[in-house]
Image (cartoon, rainbow, N blue to C red):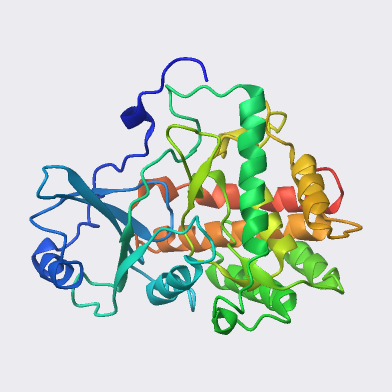
């Protein structure tokens, strides 16, 4: 891997808490001590900036040995949210049930429904210490093309392993309706986009109509993550091609695995993409050795045995869904429900994603 890795520098770290998003420690700490007894004292609180949806904090407590005992706290954002979104209780219970059968889930520690504690429902889980592959790999980490390809395969195998989990044996049959998922997703995301639409983004009628007219006849139902990206993975700091955790289970459900893959491909910016795509890249899928989008599809289908005549529906769905998510985020900024400056120009990204949808429909993506 080239030069020796500075493990602390490479390991993912949170930053300063955003103004207006501070935690009320006066009411939080008594609750934490009551529900997670090994936490003592007043923690150092930092916040992760990668997520655009739920707010995620790292609380670093000093234990009796003088070492840090870090935990992660997740809560929903302030402002109008889609029905069913930011359900911390569901996210907590799903991961708790999944942990015994899917090794990549962090350990759940406690869940709080009482919004009076910090102003929102939240849960606390273990912190997985490792490397999160964000827009670029850590400065001290240099993977060869072969190692990058190994990481890519391992990530896809992680997704495939999730899709093969026996959700009935894991007592997760109740988390969603299952059958009819594809139709519900198209209707749901079209409705969410239209509800969150602001004056400065397109109506997208052509794309919505195309999706409704091209729903596949067959669907498969399994556990799906629906936000499976490199920046939701945790890599072993000593062996960075190995994955030790999968994060952010907010959107996980019983759904179609090919739609889950389509969601992942919406974020997959490869080395030969245009300048606008590269400006939106948030994971290192451009590195030499990474699969192209077509190679990802071929690998996944080869490993799972699924037969698909035309993957365009799943690609367009993933892109449109991402556009709707981006628009929901921008809607909160537009209506001054959040002041995060990172959201200011997301409306332009929505335009670009709609163009990508049209390109995928034409088979040019």
- Residue at image position (66%, 63%) is 163
The quadrant holding residue 307 is bottom right
Instruction: Note whether residue 286 is visible.
Output: no
Query: Where residue 145 sits in the image (x, y, percent)?
Result: 65, 24
Is 131 on the left-hand or right-hand side of 55? right
Query: Where residue 90 sits in the image (x, y, percent)?
Result: 44, 76
The quadrant holding residue 241 is top right
- Residue at image position (43%, 23%) is 139
Closer to the camera in the image, 204 or 357 = 357
* Quadrant the C terminus occupies: top right
Instruction: Note whether residue 30 is visible.
Output: yes
Q: Is residue 325 above or below residue 120?
A: above
Q: Is residue 131 above or below residue 119?
A: above
Closer to the camera in the image, 243 or 186 = 243
- Residue at image position (68%, 56%) is 160
Query: Where residue 364 sits in the image (x, y, percent)?
Result: 84, 43
Is 33 on the left-hand or right-hand side of 260? left
Is 40 on the left-hand or right-hand side of 322? left
Is 173 on the left-hand or right-hand side of 244? right
- Residue at far right of view: 309
Closer to the camera in the image, 132 or 116 = 132
- Residue at far top of view: 3
Closer to the camera in the image, 231 or 92 = 92
Query: Where residue 127 sits in the image (x, y, percent)?
Result: 33, 52
- Residue at image position (37%, 61%) is 107
């Amino acid at each position: 891997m080239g030069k020796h890795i500075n493990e602390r520098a490479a390991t993912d770290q949170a930053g300063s808490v955003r103004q207006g998003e501070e935690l009320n420690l006066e009411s939080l700490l008594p609750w934490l001590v009551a529900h997670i007894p090994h936490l003592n004292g007043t923690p150092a609180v930092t916040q992760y900036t990668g997520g655009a949806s739920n707010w995620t904090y790292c609380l670093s407590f000093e234990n009796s040995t003088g070492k840090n005992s870090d935990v992660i706290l997740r809560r929903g954002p302030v402002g109008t949210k889609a029905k069913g979104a930011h359900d911390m209780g569901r996210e907590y219970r799903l991961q708790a049930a999944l942990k015994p059968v899917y090794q990549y889930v962090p350990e759940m520690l406690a869940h709080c429904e009482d919004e009076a504690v910090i102003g929102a429902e939240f849960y606390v889980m273990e912190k997985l210490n490792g490397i999160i592959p964000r827009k670029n790999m850590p400065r001290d980490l240099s993977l060869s093309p072969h190692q990058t390809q190994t990481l890519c395969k391992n990530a896809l195998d992680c997704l495939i392993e999730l899709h093969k989990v026996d959700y009935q044996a894991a007592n997760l049959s109740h988390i969603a309706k299952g059958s009819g998922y594809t139709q519900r997703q198209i209707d749901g995301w079209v409705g969410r986009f239209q509800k969150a639409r602001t004056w400065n983004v397109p109506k997208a009628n052509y794309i919505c109509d195309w999706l409704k007219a091209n729903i596949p006849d067959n669907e498969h139902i399994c556990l799906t993550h629906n936000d499976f990206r490199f920046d939701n993975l945790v890599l072993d700091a000593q062996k960075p091609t190995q994955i030790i955790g999968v994060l952010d289970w907010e959107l996980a459900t019983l759904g179609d695995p090919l739609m889950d893959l389509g969601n992942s491909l919406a974020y997959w910016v490869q080395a030969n993409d245009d300048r606008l795509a590269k400006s939106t890249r948030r994971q290192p899928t451009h590195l030499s050795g990474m699969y192209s989008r077509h190679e990802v599809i071929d690998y996944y289908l080869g490993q799972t045995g699924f037969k698909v005549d035309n993957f365009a529906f799943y690609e367009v769905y993933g892109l449109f869904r991402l556009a709707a998510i981006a628009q929901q985020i921008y809607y909160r900024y537009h209506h001054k429900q959040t002041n995060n400056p990172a959201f200011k120009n997301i409306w332009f990204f929505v335009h670009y994603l709609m163009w990508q949808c049209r390109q995928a429909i034409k088979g040019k993506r």
